Amino acid sequence: MKLSKKFTALALALTVGTSAFAIDGTEIMTKVFDRQKPDFSKAAVQLTLAKNGKVEETRNVGEYGRCKNNLSDVVMIFLSPASVKDTRFLQKENDGKDDDKWIYLPSLKSTRRVAASDGSKSFVGTDFSYDDMSTREVADDTHELIKESEDKGNFKDLYVVKSTPKDPKSSQYQYRISYITKDAWIPTYIELYDKKGKLMKVNEIKRIDKMPGANGRVYNVPMENVMTNVQTGHSSTIKMVNVELDKPLSDRYFTTDFLSSGK
């Protein structure tokens, strides 16, 4: 009888222990998608292009962000060098469908919508594609939890999730593998595999800072993000030089009129 009680107690302990840590890939990616974002953000950004570690060009960019009804909008204004100066980009997140994107090209003095068919194209000559700039809907992919704990890059004890498009035509990648922090729910390392199943690109966050917003909330902010095309040896590094959070911004920034005029 004593043995039976011990067995029952052990079985219960194991069950409780397992359920305390049980989470699946879809739950993890939902937490990533729903993590708290600032209502507004303003940042000075340094964008560096390099080939096999040798710097080719450094760009200075202004970035404005807004999160309204849990949907994020972002504007990027290229300030230098002259080859990209006054290029402006606007992305507006939609609920349940592809984001809307527009780009103003000063050489053409016109704003054009970025078509969904252009999603795999390079974003202003960087290693990020237009689709890389967006966050995919959780429901667009199947998500498999591969490991509950793995160290990668500058971060430890990460969830590892494999995400595969339900519709292969909806993504330029066959699948992606994300390494995700358990406290901030941020993918700090993402492996992107091409249609042949070969590793194509790696998107790595090098540093995350805790930053207070003007409203008193504290956010986890990725401060350095490197996208590397492992097939070509080319990389694009985004560094946040100065960040302001939750200081209200005019709605005017997030319009195509602002793209065209810059004011």
Image (spheres, grey):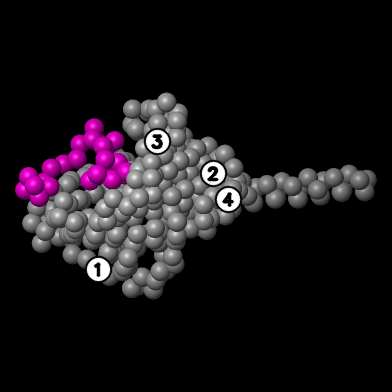
Is residue 242 rendered to the left or right of residue 76? right
Tag 3–tag 2 contact (CB < 8 Å): no
Quarter the N terminus occupies: top right
User: Residue 162 lies in magenta, yes or no?
Assistant: no
Is residue 109 rendered to the left or right of residue 172? left
Q: Earlier in the sequence, mark 4 or mark 3?
A: 4
Q: Earlier in the sequence, mark 1 or mark 2?
A: 2
Q: Quadrant of residue 129?
A: top left
- Three-letter code, disc 3: Gln
The secondary element bearing badge 2 is classed as: strand
Q: Which residue is mark 2?
A: 160
Tag 3–tag 1 contact (CB < 8 Å): no
- Mark 4 vs mark 3, foreground winner is 3
Q: Which residue is mark 1?
A: 248
The secondary element bearing badge 4 is classed as: strand
Q: Which mark is residue 151?
A: 4
- Three-letter code, disc 1: Pro
245 relative to 32, above or below: below
Q: Earlier in the sequence, mark 3 or mark 2?
A: 2
Q: Earlier in the sequence, mark 4 or mark 1?
A: 4
- Three-letter code, disc 4: Asp
